[in-house]
Image (tube, rainbow, N blue to C red):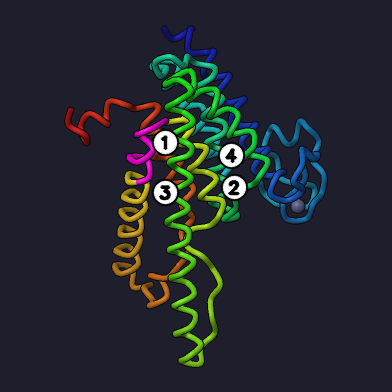
């Protein structure tokens, strides 16, 4: 039992390195570039990078690298012990790797990159096919796309109306959209993965998760008296919630039974 956990610990740690590396490199250079310091762009030697050393000018790597290493290792042990039915350990770990990269990059940069989307779409299509067959996987993606497109257009309309009102009041317009085109693409991909009709549930669950966390944040701000009127209009990246929703559906399907009777 204990000895057999060496594999998931090693693979999980390795997956953490990859998530950290891709989250460092892709948003800045859009390619698999040599690791460099995010603050001063001093290059890292591979060994220093893998050991999380500070750069030659003393900039530390930040807390995220450790959060990612621990999270990926823990998740790797979890899917080793309880691989999702029909997937098995390695495909599940690959999926977690994709989830991790999208989660971190969207949290840090409010960005969903096309290159992660292309790789993710291929992976989600294959895994979705294995889990529910072609029809459900393709319909899930199409359904996700259409539903999110509806929300997206509503969001654009809302932003326009708000800006018109702000301009009428002589205030500066704010161009930021709550829901980006990247979210539409992400839910299309996750729709391939969870299939039809669960993509409906994914969207609902993610919105509820997002609302719940925002509520906690606002309460936290109120309690610590850092609350400002603007806090309610602050931008929340939705990507991490969609990823969390998809994670729950694929990896902890039992919790579905609690929420959806029958
Ligand atoms: Zn540096």
Tell me: residue 223, above or below residue 24: below
Residue 176 picture location, percent across and down: 54, 68
The residues bearing labels 3 and 4 have C-alpha atoms spaced at a distance of 24 Å
111 sits to left or right of 188: right
**Which mark, residue 147?**
3
User: Which residue was labeled with disc 2?
Assistant: 105
- Magenta residues, dominant SS class: helix
Among numbered discs 3 and 4, the one appearing first in the sequence = 4
**Which mark, residue 246?**
1
Q: Quadrant of residue 114?
A: top right
Which residue is at the front of the view, 139 or 63?
A: 139
The residue carrying pointer 2 sits among few (fewer than 14), some (14 to 19) or many (20 or more) residues within 10 Å by Cα, namely many
Q: Nearer the viewer, mark 3 or mark 4?
A: 3
Among numbered discs 3 and 1, the one appearing first in the sequence = 3
Is 215 magenta? The answer is no
Residue 116 picture location, percent across and down: 63, 39
Q: Are marks 2 and 4 in contact (CB under 8 Å)?
A: yes
**Which mark, residue 101?**
4
């Amino acid at each position: 039992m204990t000895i057999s956990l060496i594999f998931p610990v090693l693979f999980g740690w390795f997956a953490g390195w990859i998530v950290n590396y891709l989250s460092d490199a892709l948003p800045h250079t859009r390619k698999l570039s040599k690791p460099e310091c995010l603050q001063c762009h001093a290059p890292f030697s591979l060994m220093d990078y893998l050991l999380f050393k500070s750069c030659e000018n003393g900039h530390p790597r930040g807390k995220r690298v450790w959060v990612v290493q621990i999270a990926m290792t823990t998740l790797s042990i979890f899917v080793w012990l309880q691989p999702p039915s029909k997937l098995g350990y390695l495909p599940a770990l690959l999926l977690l790797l994709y989830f991790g990269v999208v989660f971190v990059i969207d949290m840090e940069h409010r960005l969903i990159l096309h290159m992660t989307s292309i790789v993710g779409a291929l992976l989600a299509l294959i895994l979705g096919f294995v889990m529910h067959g072609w029809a459900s996987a393709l319909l899930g993606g199409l359904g996700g796309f259409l539903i999110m497109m509806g929300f997206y257009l509503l969001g654009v309309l809302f932003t326009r109306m708000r800006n018109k009102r702000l301009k009428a009041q002589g205030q500066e317009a704010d161009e930021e959209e709550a829901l980006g085109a990247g979210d539409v693409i992400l839910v299309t991909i996750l729709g391939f993965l969870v299939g039809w009709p669960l993509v409906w549930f994914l969207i609902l669950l993610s919105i509820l998760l997002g609302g719940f966390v925002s509520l906690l944040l606002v309460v936290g701000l109120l309690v610590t008296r850092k609350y400002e009127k603007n806090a309610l209009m602050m931008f929340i990246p939705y990507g991490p919630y969609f990823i969390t929703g998809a994670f729950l559906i694929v990896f902890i399907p039992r919790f579905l039974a609690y929420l959806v009777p029958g």
